[in-house]
Amino acid sequence: MDNAGIFDVIVIGTGLTESITAAAFAKAGFKVAHLDENVYYGGDEASLSFEEYINWAIHAKDSTQFSSISLSSSDALPNSRQYSISLSPSVIPAAGPLISSLVASGVSRYGGFRLVEQVAVYSNHEVKTVPGSKEDIFKDKTISLLDKRRLMRFLVFASGDEDFEARTELEGAKADMPFVEFLKTTFSLDQEMAETITYALSHCVSPSDKALSALRRLRRYLRSAGRYGHSPFLIGQYGSSGEIAQGFCRTAAVAGCVYILGKEISSITRNRNFDESQSTPTYTLTLSDFPETITCDLIVSSESRFPAGLLGNTGDILRIPPAFPAAGGEIPFTIARGVCIIDQPLSFVSRQESSSSEEGDGQESRPTLDTGIFVFPPSSLSTGAASSAVTVLVVGEGTMSVPKGKWILYLSTSINTAVSPEQLLKPYLDMTLSLSSSTDTSIIPLFTSFYLQTTSPSSYTTSSTKSSLNTSSRPDHSFGSSLPTILLSPAPPNSPLPDSGDAAAVNAEAVFWEAVKALKSIKASKKLRKTLEDQVPPTVIRDEEEEEEEEELVEIESFWPPVVNEEDDEE
Amino acid sequence: MHGVRRARQSKEALEVKRRKEQSKLRDYLALTDDVLTRKKRNEWSREALHATTQLLQINPEFYTVWNYRRRILINGVFPESTPEQIKDLLTDDLSLTMEALKIHPKVPGISDDGDPRGWEKELWNQELFVVEKLLDADPRNFHAWSYRRLVLESMPVPKLETSDLAYTTRKIESNFSNFSAWHQRSKVLSSLWSQEFDLVHNAMYTDPKDQSVWIYHRWLIGSGDSRDILEREIAIIQSLLEEESDSKWCMESLVHYKRLLLRNHASSVVTSTLTQDCIQLLHQLRKVDPGRRERYHEIASELMSS
């Protein structure tokens, strides 16, 4: 057999993190194979057509990630292929690691992006639009003059350049104070304003979220505002998360990455003999219903997709810790999600606000929206039981993920006790529909579905400790097994809403550099073996070695090489 | 009606007219009797309503009958009718009123009939349409202008001031000898003026450091002829200063406006307190805005010597 089935690295799972990593590998010149047992891209963050979604709901009961899946009906809706339902919906901050990766890798050219039009918060049993900028605050007729002053003073503080820890406002133990309390005491804001800032501007999840981490996150969002438009957040068209993962896979494929979808891995063999007479690859994988075996030096996989049972010795597995600062220090493990399809537009502008607008000459219709985010602060709904914030993401036809005249509502909240997602989220769905109906008629959903999504913590023990991440402890040219050859990329945090994409990009980069380090070591040790076998005068070989090594070192300077125009395929 | 001369009539014509009026009078008296009897009985029937309609078409000045009619509508007719029927009824009522206003445009009792319609908000737009139709026919009818103001105030969704202004402009352009149109204009402009202050306050509180806002505010105050406005604005700026204790613009504006008070309204203010306030503010200003400290010093000296 020729080199067809021999790869430098095999990536398992086409979730967003792994897709970004695969694209980076391919563009850096490595030979990559990218596998996914599903027939679609995106893994647990995939975007599915309506029928694919129903299929997924029926079969995902066997997965460890998803549970308690309910469907209001399995009948196909009209235009079912025009739906692109995301299993893990998210928005992208206009300034951040994911946007930078999208632009630097060229993936941003594959699809369009829409700005989220409005953010609103549930406050005093009403929908209230959230002011996000000085202009919004100036125009808002529902905030008193004094509150405007205090809110502005806080926002100026929050978007400052200095390190927050050095500021007097955070002296003492204030950094660890819950954000809501911090806002009330240090900036004299009332409960309503403090909650709006905490849950609808800073997108905190729980009342215990700490001030310092919340401030840092808020600053990222404030800096995103105005970059592409008024709102700080973008949504990828044609299905956000899944579509973006697919975009990275596409760019990987263009750079030579081989894709194998829909095949389960039936075995992984680790070649233990570092037989000096052969330079053998480290792993051989066979796939069900696939004639050839594929081999590689390094495996990169998402934790959830790694077929642990197939490999006995877990000595070489390294779990890469998340590189993205998590909300309040804890990653919520379980998210309750809801998907709801409606055929009437929503409006976040209250009747009061719309009637005093410039079009106030007798019109009573409220301006409707295409995309928006509606936040329920924790424990804000008397009929609701969520102790974390509940977020509702509304997407309309402008996102190209629904047919004309339809909208999808994605609900999510993190939970820490076992609960039925439908029971938990239904009151929030009902309240959203009743408050934001743009006419006086109530909205009846065409379809609803609820499920739980769990990010299980790693169950692998690793022989490589954290110290192996330091560059100083690079393995030398020995054949020992201190070299990690299986890397597990961290699962993306499921909340808050705007962070999962950026987390995926940052984590992907961490995995990439770790892998590059490992691959260089492997290549170096292989060359050394080769020189010994060939018994060629060392001087000549050493020059070649150095040249080649230098080449490799120079190649991978940055996460993304400069985008070359000839890579532009059909648009 | 304005400008229409009284026509002279011949003796025969007068006689014919007298006889007609006699029969009319007889009918009228019979009708009146009928209606008042029903009224005494507290009859709320449709027939009663119809009778009042007839009566009021003849004599719209019969206040008690208007009241009776209102009571019929509320007690008898509305509880038994569907919203559709109510709407129709009130529309008819409107046309009655409109007719009444056309014939006897100056009767106050008709205008008061806005009340039973108060809770049918869709009809306010119709009311406006009606009264504006009347004003098209008789632009100088101050009752109609007054009723129009009532309608505008009662509307659940307030009409824009600028469109009201445009309406008065049209009426004035077609004939500027119109006290009511000018009067309405003055009301609209006053309201717009206070809205201007509201807008500036919002900007002031959103960003007290923005110079353009303070300069515009200074223009709005002008030469400080209105003591009420000066005092109101001083209070608002004072509150802002309490929030933003080092705001140079707050302090400077307060000094300027208090000086205006001292200059223009010395007889009705406590001059010593105001002077003291200014001196204190100027003292703070010297620290907050050291570049202009000599100027502040000079102003303070002026104040102390005057």
Image (tube, rainbow, N blue to C red):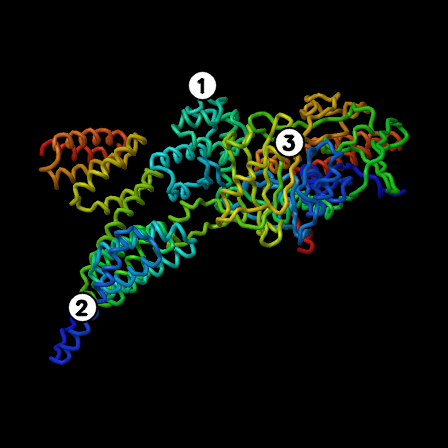
Give the answer, above or below, for where A515 lies relative to B181: above
Residue B195, percent from left and from top:
29, 47
Q: Quadrant of residue A448?
A: top right
Earlier in the chain: of badge 1 and badge 3, it is 1
The circle on residue B1 is 2
Q: Chain of mark 1?
A: A
Residue A562, percent from left and from top:
64, 45
How many residues crowd mark 2 within 10 Å: few (<14), some (14–19), many (20+)?
Answer: few
Residue type indicated by callout 2: Met
- Mark 3 = which residue? A420
Give the distance between the C-alpha atoms of the residues marked 2 and 1, in whole angstroms. Answer: 82 Å
User: B12 or B280, which is in the foreground?
Assistant: B12
Q: Quadrant of the C terminus of chain A?
A: bottom right
Q: Quadrant of residue A336?
A: top right
Task: Kindly indicate whether the residue at mark 3 contacts the one at mark 2 (C-beta within 8 angstroms).
Answer: no
Give the answer, above or below, for where A373 lies relative to B94: above
